[in-house]
Amino acid sequence: MKWDFTRWLPAIATNPNRKTAVSVVGVTALAGLAFGPTAVAAPITTGPHEGAVAAIDRATGRTTRTESGQSTAGSAASDTDTSEAAKPTRDELVPYGTQGAQSRVPLDNAQRSNAKTIVEVAKETGVGERGAVIGVATALQESKLYNLGHLGAYNDHDSQGLFQQRPSSGWGTEDQITDPEYSSTAFFEALKNVRGWRDMPLTTAAQTVQVSAYPFHYAQWEDQAADVVSQLW
């Protein structure tokens, strides 16, 4: 099911901690929300599972080196080249073609800013342009690229932020998951823990991380996500 977010998402509340969170009263429940950073959601009564711990450690800087011993900081320095030659090709962005009917929404400045953060974090975490497409498509499905705060009675459990991540499933605190840079880092580090994610259809890779009740809804945003990444890369 695809929900109409356009009527209520412009209601934005500014948070002083270098982020923007959307908080709304009287909205319809969100579809396809994230339950945790591994293929099987952990019970709420347990602590963070292994994938969440790895994502949190990396996002908070507690893990600073890769398995090869190289620092993760600046690992994608060559990706910062914004010249036309550095732009990814369509085959790199959508290597397996899109699946099913595609959806699009117009993007305002807040959405584009959040998309830019996702793209920059994709470079920093080393998931490249394909990972960036998966990240932007996931955020389009989960929040329409708005940094959502708590929606009160209409919230899905404790899901918040661009990726609708849940503190109770080990993604981080409310302040962390509503920080676009943190939430994007956590998403990509969890994606990197998915074996073979680069060879998966977008919706499969996204679903393995998100464990959504609507696993096939990510696919509809692949085309727009590819265009966004191409523009912002």
Image: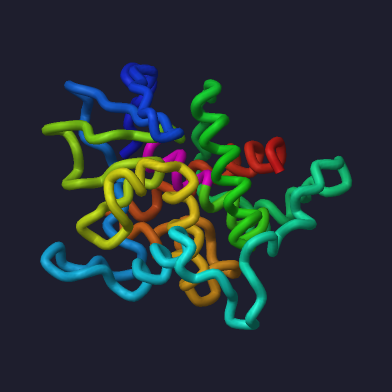
Q: Is residue 230 found inside the magenta-colored segment of the image?
A: no
Q: Residue at x 46, y 35 (%)?
A: 145
Q: How many marks?
A: 0
Among the 4 quarters of the image, the one containing residue 169: bottom left
Classify 175 as above or below 59. above
Report the residue that reaches farthest toward the bottom: 68
Classify 159 as above or below 189. above
The x, y position of residue 55, in whole percent, is: 42, 65
Indicate the quadrant containing the C terminus: top left, top right, bottom left or bottom right: top right
Q: Residue at x 58, y 51 (%)?
A: 121
Colour theme: rainbow
Q: Residue at x 62, y 47 (%)?
A: 120
Q: Is residue 137 found inside the magenta-colored segment of the image?
A: yes
The x, y position of residue 160, in whole percent, is: 29, 42
Indicate the quadrant containing the N terminus: top left, top right, bottom left or bottom right: top left
Residue segment shown in magenta = 136-144
Q: Is residue 189 left or right of residue 120?
A: left
Q: Main secondary structure of the magenta part?
A: helix
Q: Residue at x 36, y 21 (%)?
A: 12
Q: Is residue 159 left or right of residue 101?
A: left
Q: Is residue 208 left or right of residue 84?
A: left
Q: In this view of the protein, which residue sits in the foreground, 207 or 64?
A: 64
The x, y position of residue 229, in whole percent, is: 65, 42
Classify 170 as above or below 19. below
Classify 149 as above or below 57. above
